[in-house]
Amino acid sequence: MEITRVTVVGAGTMGRGITQVLAQAGIVVTMTDRDDESAQAGLAAIEASLSRAVSRGRMDQEEADLALSLIEVEAGFNSVRSADLVLEAVVEQADVKRGIFRTLDEQAPEHAVLASNTSSISITSLAAATSRPTQVVGMHFFNPVPVMGLVEVVRGFETSDGTVESTSSLARRAGKTPVEVRDFPGFVSNRVLMPMINEAIYCLMEGVATRESIDEVMNLGMNHPMGPLALADLIGLDVCFDILEVLQRDLGDPKYRPCPLLRQYVAAGWLGRKSGRGFYEYES
Ligand SMILES: NC(=O)c1ccc[n+]([C@@H]2O[C@H](COP(=O)([O-])OP(=O)(O)OC[C@H]3O[C@@H](n4cnc5c(N)ncnc54)[C@H](O)[C@@H]3O)[C@@H](O)[C@H]2O)c1
């Protein structure tokens, strides 16, 4: 199935990035959020990102204008009725996502694919909240979306080949490389990444080294482009915390227990770049 109209639910860090790259690929996208203010904030961030790309010479003004002209924003779920694919990118909480999938299933056309950008929650359990489990799939983009080349395409227990194919083909049209993985908690990316980030936070808590030294070890010694603490700030410490909790609960293994220091940062509202403070401090 050729996908021409997409609705992205959630206008946060990921939703706005996904909306931008789909529009740049010529796809008509509506980005929705709980309220108009959040949706408009997402649109303003896309406008800023596109004008940065123009001023740095990575894009023509015409391309940026064309991409913007393909984006609409709204509060609520009106646009879902005419979508070929709906991509959910709200907070990493299973009950919230299941509620949204129930609504999407009621409102989306019969042929529509329902995809989630979840980092760790079971696609099979989201599919079970709908009457169309063969059309539910994980479409896991990476942050920052305009820059990162991967989309993990997550095949749930009942996801059909056709759904995996149309999702992978959409990812390719957006200039990304789709890699298919099975539906296990954290898939491949976060099952491998989050324990590393968590261990770096334990190193900080135990005073093994300073934040800068921990990041420098992984940066220079392992050739990682960014240290794990700086990466956690970029991802969002609340998102990291939620993913670790899913890994611990769903794989039933205490080795994924979120570090108590991470728990404290999240409780204090130190969420990383998006709140201006995490392991590092950021200008607003
Ligand atoms: N941040 C990352 O690096 C990253 C990377 C890959 C995947 N993800 C996944 O993407 C999803 C979104 O993460 P994010 O970092 O963009 O979060 P975020 O907190 O930046 O944005 C979430 C958005 O969802 C909106 N929202 C919450 N409940 C809603 C509802 N009921 N209806 C409509 N909108 C609602 C919020 O208002 C907010 O704008 C999560 O599942 C996360 O695990 C995040």
Image: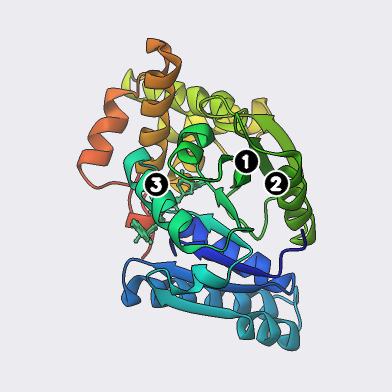
User: How many other residues sit within 10 Å of disc 2, few (<14), some (14-19) or many (≥20)?
Assistant: many
* Element under disc 1: helix
Type of amino acid under label 2:
Thr
User: Residue sitting at 55 percent across and 45 percent down?
Assistant: 132
Circle number at residue 97:
3
Q: Position of residue 161 (x, y in %)?
A: 75, 39
N-terminal-most mark, 2 or 1: 1
Q: Quadrant of the C terminus?
A: bottom left
Q: Is residue 220 above or below residue 95?
A: above
- Percent x, y for residue 15? 51, 60
Colour mapping = rainbow
Residue found at x 75% / y 52%: 166
* Label number found at residue 134: 1
Which amino acid type is shown beneath numbered disc 1?
Thr
In the visual, does 193 lie left or right of 73? right
CB of residue at label 3: within 8 Å of ligand 1?
yes
Residue under label 2: 163
Dots 3, 1 in contact, CB < 8 A: no
The mark nearer the N terminus, 3 or 2, is 3
